[in-house]
Amino acid sequence: EEKIEQIGQIFINRPEITHCYIRRTYPSWPYNIYTMIHGRCEEECLSLVKKIKKETGLEDFQLLFSDEELKKTSMKYF
């Protein structure tokens, strides 16, 4: 929690990360930063995670990989 701004800045400066949000934690989900990392394959994403881990010092995180893209559009404001 005390490093959230510093670590968030590292995330937002990486071109491979397109989303970076601070989220509320829950007893079953203790993670307070959400990012979306893009790569051509799982190995490329894992390589980037390894670099980010070294840069931030983060050890406790959860990776979630997409199985299938159901929708991808640009946001339209009313």
Image (spheres, rainbow, N blue to C red):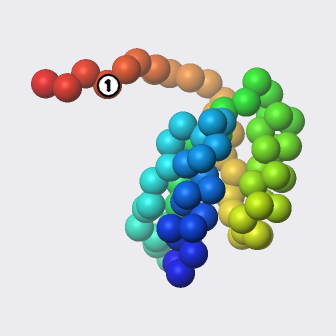
Is residue 28 at least partly visible in the picture? no
- Residue that protrudes farthest toward the left in the picture: 78
Residue depicted at x 68% and y 58% = 62
Residue 28 placement: quadrant: bottom right
Where's the C terminus, which quadrant? Answer: top left
The one nearer the camera, 8 or 44, is 8
Q: Where is residue 26 in the image (x, y as percent from the top left)?
A: 46, 72
Q: Which residue type carries mark 1? A: Met
Residue 14 placement: quadrant: top right
**Relative to residue 1, is residue 24 depicted above or below?**
above
* Number of marks drawn: 1
- Residue that protrudes farthest toward the bottom in the picture: 2
Residue depicted at x 43% and y 62% = 23
**Relative to residue 78, is residue 8 depicted above or below?**
below
Is residue 20 at least partly visible in the picture? yes
Residue bearing the label numbered 1: 75
Residue depicted at x 63% and y 36% = 15
Mark 1 surroundings: few (<14), some (14-19) or many (≥20) residues within 10 A: few
Q: Left of 4 or right of it: where is 14?
A: right
SS for dot 1: loop
Q: Where is residue 41 in the image (x, y as percent from the top left)?
A: 79, 28
**Relative to residue 13, is residue 76 depicted above or below?**
above
Residue depicted at x 57% and y 67% = 6
Q: Where is residue 3 in the image (x, y as percent from the top left)?
A: 57, 75
